[in-house]
Amino acid sequence: MIPPSDAFRAAANAAARAYQSAPPFVHYQTTSIVDIPALKKYTVINREVETRTSDDYAVLQDLPHGQRQYGHSFPLIPTFDALSYFSINFSLHGHNVLSSVTLDQPITFSDPKPSNPDVAVITTFLKYYYPTDAPDSTDAIRHLIMQPLPSLTTGNKSDFYLHDVYIDTTTYLPTKVIYTGPKITFELDYTMVENHWLIDHAHYDRTLVGPLHIGTTHFSADATFDHFTFPATPNDPNLAASPPPAH
């Protein structure tokens, strides 16, 4: 079994390759449950989504015969690479729930090279995390616990960091990725559909602090993805246009 740092490097490279080779269009259905107990809001959203993966431009159709709109994939694009640099946006306007996860850059690693020809052994490490094997790791699924290092957290305004990565040891693609923070959890489960690496479950919960740190509001969003298809050309002609038309 390779060291944990090498396993993470391999998983990040595999995830980046899968993301970069995503099909041009993905059609799917999602059921998303948004729960805000303090506001007594419990909303179930059933949507059919068709997305252009090159720029995450999508048509969102509320099922069975509701609103039709254009924007980012909902609740996030299923080809998303969770081992990348990204940001999360979430908004609730009345009964219209919108969200997006913006991927800034996939994380990739190059093969280490010896400093001189006499070097026989190369030891790798990660600059921002210290990974260790969890007790439930198996030969089939490697579970890494990721400890963020001061090189990442010092002066960093982020309120959540990578905590768990589950890796298929055959493909080295992640099967589950979890980010945590004092007031946030972001969890993604992956599956393979027709040789495409896709999210089939996502969970996001967060506690928001009120002005002057008075009062808190907790909300959660839980989503499943299914009925995936991969059309060569989009069913909605607006997705064939580039740049996206104004709506």
Image (cartoon, grey):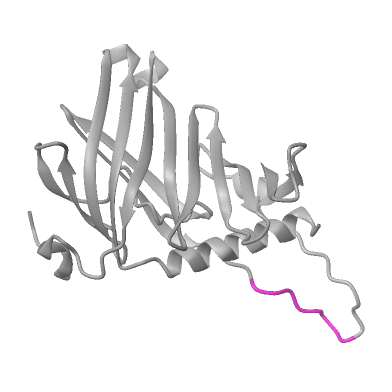
Q: Main secondary structure of the magenta part?
A: loop
| Extreme residue in the bottom direction | 117
Note whether 236 is above or below 93 in the view shown. below
User: Does the magenta run of residues contain 69?
Assistant: no
Note whether 155 is above or below 235 in the view shown. above
Which quadrant of the structure image shows residue 205?
A: top left
Which quadrant of the structure image shows residue 40?
A: top left
Measured as percent of width and height from the top left, residue 4 is found at 75, 53
40 sits to left or right of 80: left
Measured as percent of width and height from the top left, residue 201 is found at 43, 40
Measured as percent of width and height from the top left, residue 24 is found at 31, 68
131 sits to left or right of 102: right
Q: Nearer the viewer, residue 18 or 8?
A: 18
Q: Which residues are magenta?
A: 110-117
59 sits to left or right of 201: left
Q: Where's the C terminus, which quadrant? A: bottom left
At x 73%, y 61%, the residue is: 6
Note whether 181 is above or below 238 in the view shown. above
Q: Nearer the viewer, residue 173 or 217?
A: 173
Residue 75 in sight: yes
At x 31%, y 27%, the residue is: 34
154 sits to left or right of 23: right
At x 18%, y 47%, the residue is: 60
Residue 107 in sight: no
